Image (spheres, grey):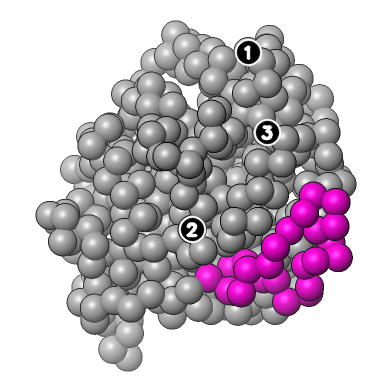
Amino acid sequence: MKRLLSSLFVSAVFGTTAIASEESKTWDASDEARQFVMDTIVIGMLASPYGTGWTEYKQLHDYFDLARENGITGHEMTLAAADMSFDTLLEQHYHFRAAMAEQSDKFIIVNETRDIEAAHLQGKTAVIWNSQTATILDGDLKKMALFKDMGIKSMILAYNDVFRTGTGQLSAQKGLDIGLTPWGKSVIDEMVRFGILLDLSHTGSKTANDAMDYVDENYPGVPYVYTHSVPAGLYKDEPNATPQGCYRAIPDDEAIRAAESGGYVAPTFTEWMMDGIWPEDISPAQAADMIDYYVKLVGVDHVGIATDDMFSTELVVNFAKANAAMYDDGGYMIDAFNKGATGNGELAKILAAITDDLWARGYSNEDLAKIYGGNKMRVYAQVWEGKPPEQFLAEYPERLRIREEMRKGFFAR
């Protein structure tokens, strides 16, 4: 299933059938676990923009059909990554929306948390837009109002390289972290103004900590999150781990700070980021290890899940080659791919098995409902709707009861 890669001849080695997400293994699980996932709001992450991870609309249709069939309510979906312009954002948004327009009855573009509940009730896919870069502003802060109306719900300041806002993780690992810039502060100001969630995934540690300091000092009580970041602490003692670790991993102190802000951290079940392990297929136990590590570190109220799904490894590698300066990681990703770690644990295929594993570790249904979607919903309600966490938590049990009664009635028709 996996193909040996080299940094010089990767395109020649990879065939057109290397579809990483579609190749990921489907894991056995109990009927009870499968039903629990179906009954629970589950929010994952599809970090695969058009042209980077997929090119055919059928890929999206097949992916979302499988997700719906297996109880995945919605996905934070990446519209831009790396050095992307506003025009590129529009192109990527167009292709996502054009694909969805072919099956318009199956999607709900999320504006409020109730849209996520509606998608769960109706068996549709909740679409939550995420941008992995602030370069889509093209230097114009007024575009943030447009992004709000487009439904962009979270944004990353810097991805891999050094930007006007600050520094991404790869450049930071090379000692080039300039920290949060004045422009970066202005971007955060506008994100807070328009209720767009600050996502610190892929952000260099100095820039991330500067951003957290800025929010804490100027907007106390506003949470920030890591939407898809593996825990560095889980892998640092692996016998085969690289000296610096995977540049995508985040240190424990950053995860703790996000939780203390009221936010969450969501591990991504992505094989090439699992430093020192790089499995052929990430197992449910390995995914559960990530969740369990974060729960023990920051508490069950501040952990989510993600997958960072990518459809085509070939396209991802070609994109990295085309942006070689930004992906100059000394061969880390290619080496991980050589060792078999080209894919990820697609939620539709692995989450029920993860559920069985976490139940065996003593997690309750209430715990898992928080981790799979409830914690994200609480933060979303606070940032998007200005709803205090205590108000959301007070309302949520009744909303949950009504939603489940309606859902049972809806599917009984």
| Residue 179 in magenta stretch | no
Instruction: Classify mark 1: helix, strand or loop.
Output: loop
Considering only vertical position in the picture, is 369 above or below 39? above
The image quarter containing residue 9 is bottom right
Where residue 38 appears, as percent x and y from the top left, is 32, 73
Residue shown at 42% from the left, 39% from the top: 239
Residue located beneath label 3 in the image: 159
Magenta range is 1-24
Where residue 139 appears, as percent x and y from the top left, is 81, 25
Where residue 2 appears, as percent x and y from the top left, is 63, 68
Query: How much space separates mark 2 and mark 3, taking CA atoms?
Result: 25 Å
Main secondary structure found in the magenta portion:
loop
For label 3, count other residues whose C-alpha is less than 10 Å away and answer few (under 14), some (14-19) or many (20+).
many
| Residue 10 in magenta stretch | yes
Residue in the foreground of this view, choosing between 124 and 182: 182
Residue located beneath label 1 in the image: 179
Instruction: Classify mark 3: helix, strand or loop.
Output: loop
